[in-house]
Image (cartoon, coloured by chain):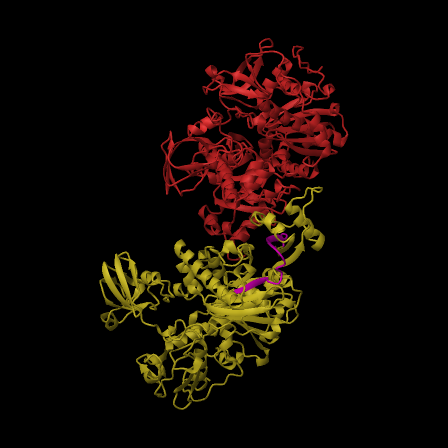
Chain colours: A yellow, B red
Amino acid sequence: MTKIVFKPSHHTVEVEPGTSLLAAIREAGVEMDAPCGGEGSCGKCIVRIESGDHETDSLGILPDVAMKEGYVLACKTQVCEGTVTVEIPEPVGRIGGKFVDNEDAGWQIHDDLLQMQGALDPLVQSIHYTVPRPRLEDGLSDLDRLLRCMHNEGGKNGVDVPISVLRSLAEVLREDDGNVTVSLVRSPHGDRVMSVEPGDRTARHYGVAVDVGTTTVAVQLVSLTTATILATRADYNAQISCGLDVISRIHYARDPLRREELRIRALSTINNLIRKVALNHEVSLHEIRAAVIAGNTTMVHLLLGLNPEYIRMEPYTPTVHTAPLCTADEVGMHIHPRAPIQICPSVGSYVGGDITAGLLCTRHADNGDAVDLFMDIGTNGELVIGNHDFLITCACSAGPAFEGGGIEHGMRAAMGAIERVDIDPLTGTATVRTIGECKPVGICGSGMISLLANLYLTGWIDQAGRFTRSRNSPAIRIEGRRAQYVLVPESESGTNNAITVSELDIDNVIRAKAAIYSAIRLLLHHVDIPMERICTIYVAGGFGRFLDLEQAITIGLIPDVPREKYRYIGNSSLMGAYFALVSSDYRTQMFELAKRMTYVELNTNLEYMHQYTGAMFLPHTDRDLFPSVRAAPLGIMRSS
Amino acid sequence: MTKIVFKPSHHTVEVEPGTSLLAAIREAGVEMDAPCGGEGSCGKCIVRIESGDHETDSLGILPDVAMKEGYVLACKTQVCEGTVTVEIPEPVGRIGGKFVDNEDAGWQIHDDLLQMQGALDPLVQSIHYTVPRPRLEDGLSDLDRLLRCMHNEGGKNGVDVPISVLRSLAEVLREDDGNVTVSLVRSPHGDRVMSVEPGDRTARHYGVAVDVGTTTVAVQLVSLTTATILATRADYNAQISCGLDVISRIHYARDPLRREELRIRALSTINNLIRKVALNHEVSLHEIRAAVIAGNTTMVHLLLGLNPEYIRMEPYTPTVHTAPLCTADEVGMHIHPRAPIQICPSVGSYVGGDITAGLLCTRHADNGDAVDLFMDIGTNGELVIGNHDFLITCACSAGPAFEGGGIEHGMRAAMGAIERVDIDPLTGTATVRTIGECKPVGICGSGMISLLANLYLTGWIDQAGRFTRSRNSPAIRIEGRRAQYVLVPESESGTNNAITVSELDIDNVIRAKAAIYSAIRLLLHHVDIPMERICTIYVAGGFGRFLDLEQAITIGLIPDVPREKYRYIGNSSLMGAYFALVSSDYRTQMFELAKRMTYVELNTNLEYMHQYTGAMFLPHTDRDLFPSVRAAPLGIMRSS
């Protein structure tokens, strides 16, 4: 066996010789990002071997000087017999990157969305009945009496009662002289009793709405008696260390054991969040009797243990769009084992239930006349355009740039992330603002947008995102054909390394914004509607929260239309799940929306490629599309 | 700890001091009858302690001489610290009592019942589909394509597909280029896919019909493709050692752990039988995709893990009459885990699904005009009278006499059981015939009926079942007010003990036959129909197989009507289960029959008590009811 000692924790683990160091690190319970899924291509799993025999293959990613100091890629290193001591450096993107873990903190919910329309009619009803005692004359069984009582007192007919409920029915009916609380699952196929408990417990009746994002999982604890939201809590999806985006997760999941690992990771994130909110509100897990889950198609597949492999291969076929109504037991959620789990239906491989749920927070659900645009920007961008006549949707892969991925000093929007950059027009030097106003440790998506917008407006980069070679700035270092921008010098950085941005980083952001803008154009082109006809643009998702509208328009990420048309609706996926949890009207609407949406596949769409090429400039090749964007005249390279 | 050594096996077991010897014996895996449920009242658990400390309380059941030799009641004996050596004698009722364990042997199925009417439409259909490959243009999920194919090729709509099936759907659809076999569960609430497997497997599609009797469990392996019965196999219900009749089982089940023990015992009997028939016919357990189970109300409750306690207490309320359609996984049956388990519906606490299923083998199911009587005689007797206009049913407790219970030398109808007795009219001595024609070891129910009928016909007992005191017979021993009949002397017995019958034994049989006959009278009285109007009397159940019609009429067990009206239909419960397994017409009929039957509770019925008193004589107080029964004129005590 090989003993591995981890520093600085001094935690040890024993593994078979030949084990990959990344596997050993995970076995030790240490979370380590490996966005590429352990393929050795992302270079995110760097550790330093202090001592001990090992075999490694740096694949040309690590510089020689680093390798001489013992740095290796954990995914490409096998440990040998004996003791190996490994130092796991705190990665740049991790410092202070802990999720804001306070309930409700940093979690935006629009109050007006809570003014719910439609009657309160939760996925599970809790009803108090007084079941008459058995009588010799009628020869009715316990079940007969219960069903008859449900029929007489509430008109319930054709109700299913599973054997697991029947196993305690005799005692339950007699414990409090026929006083029972029945929890009834509503479904289009008929009602189903999920529990019968003694006494009147209707006041203690709860559910959870869950948003399973690729990056973030959010859980809402809801009283199903009053539809009140008791708590909202979020955490990173524990799948993150197996890949940052859906494609790398699908890649990771090719091995059935790893697929199971991903399932367990998502589940444990959800279960931990539920446990915390339940504990804080003195709700027992058994009193949580329903859940609605919204997530993208891949997240839903991984959570349900479905094989996501064919989602990423042409013709991009998921196992299901509309998953059956499951039970908590089947899914593995730690609430009442027979609690129904409603999965929000998806529309395409890359337009998932999070979007269907999200539309419940817009006018699309009201079947209005006005043509609206819904956009959820993240690693993937999902768009829906339409009104009561038509609904058309597509998804585009923006890549991880807006979440700090693929950017040398990129990080997620967490403490220490640069979220805003001002540029001195004369010197080209930057002034930065960080989340938490602490020392900068990296730059997040909104920081990159701010940087690009201001570099462009001040003329320090051109439409193609290249730094001007005609003027000198202390912040711009030109080395041959390469240029690098020093955002934060070593001395002011929280990591003691300069925070820099390369033209490659800028190019990644331009590709990301081009992917989204050209998708909007493609949809409009598809239905032959001019941009002006769009009445409201709903911006959803966590990324939207930090988005500066002007700057996003400046780089050409979103359309240059009157700003009052924009409306930020927060985590509409979670809110939609909440609506579906408490209202059958919203559940019906959700399934109707999913059916009405026409999915446009962009992966093989030539028109999309055409639009994309045009959008690969700041803000766009066609300047008429962005009349309000006016760059400063300083840039010599500007094509005007 | 206490070490217990069992003889003759020399098997040992370690238990806590103070453990009941009966519990220790069961822990050692030794089956031991305890019909009273360990109450110390049946005296069936006698063992001999060779050595070792113990505390015992014989409760006056064992004679002093036996106690001096170390005989104790295992249920009333606690072992103390140290080693205890226990001899477990082979009990009288056990010698050669092993169940006829050959398939089809000794199992009567009326061929004409197999001429099944109604189309073959099994509980689970197996259908081969060719699902088209995924296409980019339509954006359909795997599930969408499967459901569309099922709709287009077979008109199946609104089909449910559980998440467990979806987990392998992606691979299954691609393994054989869309060639799949779908198993579809039929239910009134809609169809449900229970499995999707690659390739065409429709030819390997099986089901089981199960009859769970209090004494005997029978299993039939059926090809669902052709409705062919491949094998029928039976064994004793492993619950027997926890009590012989339903009342003692319910008593035993008061403790939830013991209730679980009973569930496991019934299950293991069923699972063992299924495994054997499947193995013999090279059928994999996963290819068995449906089961229909018929059993009395208590057996069904115990098998499903429902609490049977309130069945035996006024007002005699079971948890269910109609159990929901379960899965094999929920029930614990070792066939395909998602196989549907249909439980035949019961009508009352003591008229179970075995009777409802049994009626499928009679004209009652055909809604004919003629009034017929159905009777199933065992520990309980169940009766149904009616035609298309009315169906009335009741159950009476005959007690275990017909199965050898409550009779000093009684035993079940197994090898060595006396099944027929001829009496020499002059000497009063007996000539016996045994099952298997081996040395007699005890007397079974049909033997007792034969004995009583012939003792009565030859005048050696009177109408009340008492031996004549006015004549001497070498076979009759009179001791004070007690009389004993020596059926087989010591020298000819297989147990080296004389096989005797006491007046108490005879009384038990008279009580049993009176219970049944008076129940028939009560039903006729209830609907005001004379005995003559009964067209056909169906006799069902294992007991009927050994029944001599003339002798049964002689003792007044069954009505004295033209013999051609009688029809023995074998194990109609199993046959009915088979019908329900392969035909939806029969399933529909079964549920309609259960709904149509009116249950008459005898436990609190005064008219029944009146009828019962009249039937407590041979053949009856009212001789006109049995015109063909003519006792010989020899008996001096005869009241004529």
The answer to whether A159 is drawn above or below residue B507 in the figure is below
User: Residue A367: in sight, yes or no?
Assistant: yes
Residue A491 is a magenta residue: no
- Residue drawn at x 53%, y 55% is A337
In this rendered view, identify the residue nearer to me: B293 or B5: B5
In this rendered view, identify the residue nearer to me: A261 or A245: A261
**Residue A21 at x, y = what percent?**
30, 62
The answer to whether B351 is drawn above or below residue A381 in the figure is above
User: Residue A522: in sight, yes or no?
Assistant: no
Q: Quadrant of residue A433?
A: bottom left
Furthest-top residue in this view? B426
* Quadrant (top left/top right/bottom left/bottom right) for the N terminus of chain B: top left
Residue A194 is a magenta residue: yes
The answer to whether B268 is drawn above or below residue A521 in the figure is above
**Residue A289 at x, y = what percent?**
57, 59
- The number of callouts visible is 0
**Magenta region:** A188-210
Q: Quadrant of residue A616?
A: bottom left
Furthest-bottom residue in this view? A426
Q: Is residue A579 left or right of residue A26?
A: right
**Residue B626 at x, y = what percent?**
71, 19
**Residue A231 at x, y = what percent?**
54, 69
In this rendered view, identify the residue nearer to me: A460 or A241: A241
In this rendered view, identify the residue nearer to me: B422 or B496: B496
Q: Quadrant of residue A182?
A: bottom right
Q: Is residue A550 left or right of residue B313?
A: left
* Quadrant (top left/top right/bottom left/bottom right) for the C terminus of chain B: top right
